[in-house]
Amino acid sequence: MTATTLTGSLLVATPMLDEPPFRRSVILLLDHDDDGALGVVVNRAADLEVDRVLADWSDTVSAPGVLFMGGPVGTDSALAVAEIAGAVDPPGWRECFGRIGLLDLDAPPALLAGAISRMRIFAGYSGWGSGQLEDEITEGAWYVVPSEPDDVFSLRPETLWRRVLRRQRDEMAFLATYPDDPSHN
């Protein structure tokens, strides 16, 4: 395992990272060790209702009830990120950090009644091989900041990039005002 794990942290795209799919993205790291890292983009809601693709889970997902674009890897698969409601791990749930973990979408939703307080489903994920994420951070592509419990379940995901930057206590807070198109500055 790495000396310092970034699991549970947010990766916030710097203005330097200006190409899709990561432009102005906020990624929650669900796993980070010597073998690499895995996370989901938490601020890219899709225009596709969960009930159209995973109807059994439509009553369990948190508002706005749509799929989120988790990243460019495995876009034909889905990851469910959930917060457990109690101290007992429900069936099909694997802790990532704190009360946040991954939920097996093959588990029957009825078994989880009352066990999940919030949940989002992501099409695809963001992944890095051994040392790749660390290199990108060193090159200035990402800011690494602490996550807050509501980040992954934000009711306004489209504003998350600016809000996460604004709450930082250093020069990063100033970047929250960085224009969408710097040529219009």
Image (tube, grey):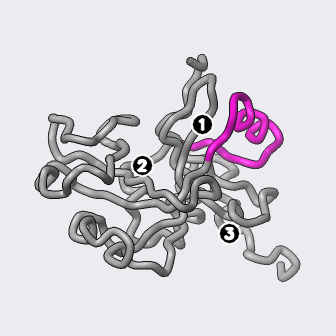
| Residue for point 33% across, 68% down | 54
Task: Answer whether residue 136 is magenta in the image.
Answer: yes
Residue 99 falls inside the magenta stretch: no
Q: Which of 126 and 166 is in front in this view?
A: 126
- In space, the residues marked 1 and 2 are separated at their CA atoms by 19 Å
When the figure is inspected, residue 168 is found, relative to residue 162, above or below; the finding is: above
Circle 1 is placed at which residue position? 37
| Residue 82, position as x, y percentages in the image | 32, 51
Q: Which of marks 1 and 2 is nearer the N terminus?
A: 1
Q: How crowded is mark 2: few (under 14 residues within 10 Å), some or many (20 or more)?
A: few
Residue mark closest to the camera, 3 vs 1: 1
For the point 32% across and 47% down, the residue is 103
User: In which quarter of the view is residue 51 placed?
Assistant: bottom left
Observer-nearest of 25 and 127: 127
- Is there a contact, CB below 8 Å, between mark 3 and mark 1? no
Judge left or right: residue 27 versus residue 83.
right
Q: Name the residue under label 2.
A: 148
Name the amino acid, label 3: Thr
Residue at which label 3 appears? 177
Q: Considering the numbered disc 2 on the image, is that residue within a helix, a strand or a loop?
A: loop
Relative to the observer, which residue lies in front, 85 or 163? 85
Q: How far apart are marks 3 and 1 (CA)?
A: 29 Å
Task: Work out how far the residue at label 3 is from the one at label 2, CA to CA, in angstroms.
Answer: 21 Å
Local secondary structure at mark 1: strand
Give the amino acid type for the residue marked by disc 2 in the picture.
Glu
Q: Give the range drawn in magenta.
A: 127-145
Above-or-below relation of 159 to 31? below
